């Protein structure tokens, strides 16, 4: 039997034949066996193609600045599994997670029938819910893992739902277009409860579902708006407003064009929750929220390294917009690797005009990863005419690209959470 956290995680990965198994029945059954009643006094669930993790971070930072006890459940992690479960800004420790897994396993195997099959993600979701309930929190923020309607976090009825964006990703599981994907994400809504829509043009399927069940849709660009305010880059400010209320804000600590939209959705969610969050807490939270590997900037010998988890065309386009707004004086070199089931050409396309040299590298810690040679073959057409070299792994590609760079050059590392994590590990030890 598993003893430590590493052993538990390895055990969980062997317990279900599929890495992803959408559906709520098994998780609901286990939640009932565990006696789970609710993770917190208030719950916000966040779904979306991109921006989920950042939106969770803004909600968390604002709520904590207001003095609330807050739990946040996010995925995937970057460097340590513990990152997935935070209570009052602190990652869950190994002992707490192991204790939760032991309770889940006892419930899973109880009774005379076959044990209930759980995926790796479902174990983690139940563990987070257990730890949150034990902590007697004011607010739990639950990030959907995939889709929404059939995702494990959807066993919890949220007081407020947030759908950040809807775009193409995971089409094999969620549907081939925005309408189908939007329907899956709309499944986190609840009748009579608010849903914050973080983009001005959500799919019609999202709006139809809100109308059908009587959820109150709060739309970006309609029910709440963002205004630019005069100021230079060092003093950039903006205004969030809704009818009868407005607040001037500093530029978000998370640097990217989409982060104002993510912060705006977070503010709208907390305003809809109506638990007395004051203006000072909103300002503090927007200024202090942090998430690693979202246009994270690290300097090495005068070379700026930008690390981002962008792994689909929409996120890559947002990253390209950020690069255009933050030009470097030298050459931009990319270190790129991605999972084999992604739209690789669609990811690199927005950045072709901004990258002077592509360093392609393999991913070896996931069965969905590609070798450097396979990645180069898949991208042969998309990168035709570009300067390209291939490397065994992210650490090697990063070292070679950094050695080739001069002060004022830039290295851009992106393509997946695995890519970003490997780069952060290499920089921490290099």
Image: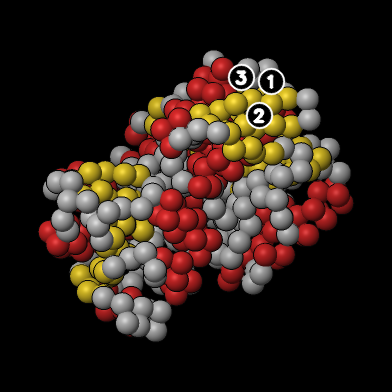
Q: CB atoms at circles 2 and 1 under 8 Å apart?
A: yes
Is residue 35 at all visible to an observer of this figure?
no
Q: Where is residue 22 in the image (x, y as percent from the top left)?
A: 60, 59
Query: Which mark is drawn over residue 275?
Result: 1
Q: Is residue 189 above or below residue 244?
A: below
Q: Is residue 203 above or below residue 304?
A: below
**Left or right of 273: which side holds 134?**
left
Which badge, 2 or 1, is on the more N-terminal residue? 2
Name the one closer to the observer, 236 or 158. Answer: 236
Mark 1 vs mark 3, CA separation in Å = 13 Å
Residue lying at 48% horizontally and 71% vertically, measured from the top left? 346
Asked which quadrant contains residue 267, the reply is top right
Which badge, 2 or 3, is on the more N-terminal residue? 2
Q: Is residue 332 above or below residue 264?
A: below
Name the one closer to the observer, 83 or 129. Answer: 83
**Left or right of 169: which side holds 386?**
left
Asked which quadrant contains residue 150, the reply is bottom right
Q: Mark 3 points at which residue?
A: 279
Residue lying at 44% horizontally and 75% vertically, measured from the top left? 345
Name the one closer to the observer, 342 or 238. Answer: 238
**Left or right of 197: which side holds 192?**
right
Mark 2 vs mark 3, CA separation in Å = 11 Å
**Which mark is nearer the camera, 2 or 3?**
3
């Amino acid at each position: 039997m598993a003893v430590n956290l590493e052993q538990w995680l390895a055990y969980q990965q062997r317990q279900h034949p599929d890495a992803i198994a959408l559906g709520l029945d098994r998780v609901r059954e286990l939640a009932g066996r565990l006696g789970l009643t609710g993770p917190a006094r208030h719950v916000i669930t966040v779904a979306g193609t991109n921006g989920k993790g950042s939106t969770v971070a803004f909600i968390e930072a604002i709520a904590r600045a207001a003095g609330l006890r807050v739990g946040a459940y996010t995925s995937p992690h970057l460097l340590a599994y513990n990152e997935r479960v935070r209570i009052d800004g602190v990652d869950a420790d190994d002992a707490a997670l192991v204790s939760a897994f032991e309770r889940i396993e006892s419930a899973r195997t109880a009774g005379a029938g076959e044990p209930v099959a759980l995926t790796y993600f479902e174990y983690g979701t139940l563990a987070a819910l257990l730890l949150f309930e034990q902590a007697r929190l004011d607010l739990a923020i639950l990030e959907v893992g995939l889709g929404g309607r059939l995702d494990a976090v959807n066993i919890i009825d949220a007081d407020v739902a947030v759908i950040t964006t809807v775009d193409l990703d995971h089409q094999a599981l969620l549907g081939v277009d925005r309408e189908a994907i939007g329907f899956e994400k709309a499944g986190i809504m609840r009748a009579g409860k608010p849903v914050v829509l973080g983009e001005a043009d959500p799919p019609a399927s999202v709006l139809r579902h809100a109308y059908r069940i009587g959820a109150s849709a709060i739309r970006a660009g309609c029910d709440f708006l963002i205004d630019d305010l005069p100021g230079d880059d060092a003093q950039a400010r903006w205004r969030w407003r809704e009818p009868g209320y407005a607040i001037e804000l500093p530029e978000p600590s998370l640097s990217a064009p989409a982060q104002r939209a993510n912060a705006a959705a977070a503010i709208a969610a907390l305003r809809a929750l109506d638990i007395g969050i004051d203006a000072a807490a909103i300002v503090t939270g927007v200024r202090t929220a942090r998430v690693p590997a979202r246009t994270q900037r690290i300097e090495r010998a005068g070379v700026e390294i930008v690390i981002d988890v962008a792994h689909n065309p929409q996120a890559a386009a947002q990253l390209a917009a950020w690069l255009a707004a933050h030009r470097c004086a030298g050459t931009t070199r990319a270190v790129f690797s991605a999972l084999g089931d992604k739209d690789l050409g669609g990811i690199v396309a927005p950045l072709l005009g901004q990258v002077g040299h592509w360093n392609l590298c393999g991913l070896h810690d996931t069965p969905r990863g590609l070798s450097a040679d396979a990645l180069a073959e898949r991208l042969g057409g998309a990168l035709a005419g570009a300067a390209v070299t291939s490397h065994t792994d992210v650490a090697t590609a990063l070292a070679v690209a950094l050695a080739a760079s001069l002060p004022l050059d830039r290295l851009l590392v992106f393509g997946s959470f695995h890519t970003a994590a490997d780069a952060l590990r290499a920089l921490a030890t290099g």
